Image: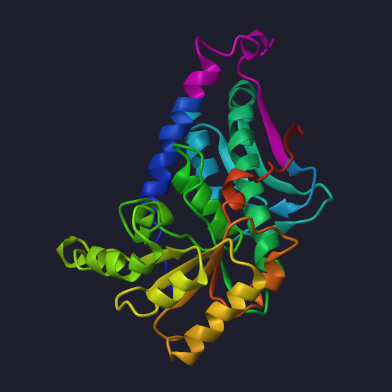
Amino acid sequence: MVDGSLIVADHEALLAQAKSLAEMAREEDLGRGDITSGLLPDSGEQGVFRMVNREAGVFAGRDIAETIVRTYTDDVAVKWAKDGEDGFAFGAEATSLIELSGSVATILTLERVLLNFLQRLCGIATKTRRFVDAVEGTGVQILDTRKTTPGWRHLEKYAVRCGGGRNHRMGLHDAVLIKDNHLSHRPIEQTSAVVFEMLNKIESLKPPPVFVEVEADTLDQVRQLYSVVGIDVVLLDNFSLGELREAVALRESLNLTDRIKLEASGGITLDTVSQIARAGIDYISVGALTHSAIAVDLALDRVR
């Protein structure tokens, strides 16, 4: 993480999780069968449907959409209205995003599950893009957190990437993040000693962690952590703007800018993120990207 790189996403894990969730959603929704679509006069009727937006947003979920459709059938063709990767923005005016052609009954059966997935993922990508746009020009990277929907972590972190954000650690297994609760049983003046003791055990970890980060609640803790070798990132939790600037100034005075990155977190909103980014830090982590994203309104309409 010292060079700015964070967790490397696993596309195979993303698709495996999408398949598992799609199968679960299909079973939950379909149960004994789609009794309404089964009443259609022509069970073999073919048709074309288009997914359109009803508001502005950022698209996420191309491969996931394909996985969901294939969970139901191999006989529905998926045509993309836009070439290229996820992450494209669409305006408030209705735009064709996906075209599905095939059995009308089958498309009607999978319609709601497909929309549920894509509305959620587009909502996360859209919220992330707003934060990314708000810090444009500062060099600060917007990060997500582990505040994800259980079972959806790969999908939601993928949507963050589609919105231009970066992924923090994927879970407890790939990076070290020593938080306040790891240190709360010791007096604050012992922070550096406790952290040093914990970091001495890192050499035994196989594979090694992607990065080592330690949370600080006060400037006194920051001063202590700057003296510990082996820390890649100091997390400044709920620091005021003035405190953030002090932490940055102290890092510069100690010539640690190239060795230790600074991450701000805690209650950060679109109203405050720009000011925080200009304090001189490197990363801003925002739990709201995933835990508070509002679904983008999408619809699937039959066109013929």
* Image quadrant assignment for residue 203: bottom left
Quadrant for the N terminus in the image: bottom left
Residue 35 versus residue 21 in the image, above or below: above
Q: Is residue 39 left or right of residue 64?
A: right
Camera sees residue 73: no
Q: Looking at the picture, does residue 111 appear above or below residue 173?
A: above
- Range shown magenta: 26-51
Residue 205 in percent (x, y) is at 19, 61
Residue at image position (36%, 50%) is 12
Q: Which of the colour schemes (rainbow, by chain, secondary structure, one colour) is used?
A: rainbow
**Which residue is painted at 56% across and 48% down in the image?**
61
Q: Position of residue 10 (x, y in %)?
A: 37, 55
Q: Is residue 19 magenta?
A: no
The relative height of residue 285 versus residue 65 in the rendered view (above or below) is: below
Q: Residue at x 42, y 71 (%)?
A: 233
- In-image side of 185 versus 288 (left or right): left
Task: Please tell me which residue lies in front, 220 or 257.
Answer: 220
Residue 32 among those drawn in magenta? yes
Q: Where residue 2 appears, x then y in whole percent?
A: 39, 77
Return the residue nearer the eye: 44 or 165: 165
